[in-house]
Image (cartoon, rainbow, N blue to C red):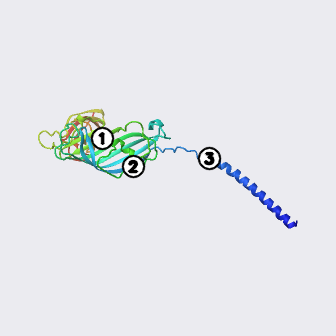
Amino acid sequence: MSATSATRRLCQAQTHEGAKNLFSKLVKVLAAPAAIIGVLAVPAVASAAPHATVKAVTHLTNYLDYGYSGPWAADNLRRTATVTLLGTALLSDCGGGPIVACYQYTGRISDTGTARAFTGAFSPGAQAVKITGTPVARVNGHAVVNFFASSNAPTGALVPDTLSGYSSLNDPNWVKQFFPSTTRFGPGIFKLATYTWTYVDTRNCQIWVKAYNVSQANSGDITGVSYCTGSSHHGWVRLSGGRAYSVSPTRENYSWVQSRPSWDKLTIVGPGPINGHVGYVNAMHPGRVYAYYTGLESQHTYVVTIQPQFTPGGAPAGPFGRVTFYTR
């Protein structure tokens, strides 16, 4: 064997042994990250970002509107809806079952638009009489619904931009459209926590209020019969029973009674910077309404004029009234 051949074989042996050692080191080095990767691969529940809000706007046409006596009008509305993630919840709040997380939400619905009544349908409110003609009322409403859902990924992209005709999703369930179809919701039927829809027929001087804290008897009505003229004026807001009492030399509480819901424009006349100040009270319930002024001057007379209106700054909803008081 020549020296050259011996040297070549030694180099090949050393090269082969070096490759084995290098491969062995690489295996050892790669083994540790593999274990770490295995730990990271265990499924984890994504954390919820509290108070994250998503929004969607839908234009509703010919949307069926229900009163106390059944469907009475077709609405054309601009509905703005939001859902806000409040935080995590117990799995049982979402009904349990095959879910890995549950989240608490609050949803809000706001509507603006018009309602066109059906001739001959029963009126929506207190009178429950057949509607004359096709009165049109302006609509302004809002509602809140609190609920639980197994998804923390609501999106406004799932809510339709337009909707015509009756929807199978009643108002409390409207917010479900923000979520994927696989989402599980809290047990029980969705219910509105609070809601108020106000319908104003300025042509016939009528208001109907559909609200969680207003009874049918006190809700007003939309009947198609004009109460703007004639001796009765049953559709007008009537004010009475004005009174005031002093809390301090610079503050006065006052109140009055009104026959129907309305927005009330308040204008005060008297000494000091408050003279001529204009404010509004949302008097949503018939009965006594309470208000107060601060920043008054001691031992002076002030006069507050109360003008019921269908909407803030809108048409009068009845004759004005006045409350006069003298600060101590």
Q: Which residue is mark 2?
A: 55
Mark 3 vs mark 1: in front: 3
- Residue 238: % across, % down: 19, 38
Q: Which residue is mark 1?
A: 196
- Residue positioned most to the front: 1
Q: Tag 1 or tag 3, which sits nearer the N-term? A: 3
Dot 2: what SS? strand
Q: CA distance from mark 3 to mark 1?
A: 54 Å
Q: Is residue 292 left or right of residue 34?
A: left
- Residue 59: % across, % down: 31, 51
Dot 3: what SS? helix
Give 130 or 212, whichever is nearer the viewer: 130
Identify the amino acid type marked 1.
Answer: Thr
Q: Tag 1 or tag 2, which sits nearer the N-term? A: 2
Quadrant in the rendering for residue 235: top left
- Residue positioned most to the left: 231
**Residue sitting at x 16%, y 39%:** 234
Identify the amino acid type marked 2.
Answer: Lys
Q: Are marks 2 and 1 in contact (CB under 8 Å)?
A: no
Residue 267 seen anywhere in this rendered image of the structure: no
**Residue sitting at x 39%, y 49%:** 55
Q: Quadrant of the C terminus?
A: top left
Q: Quadrant of the N terminus?
A: bottom right
Q: Is residue 127 left or right of residue 53?
A: left
Q: Which residue is mark 3?
A: 38
Q: Is residue 39 left or right of residue 123?
A: right
Q: Are marks 3 and 1 in contact (CB under 8 Å)?
A: no
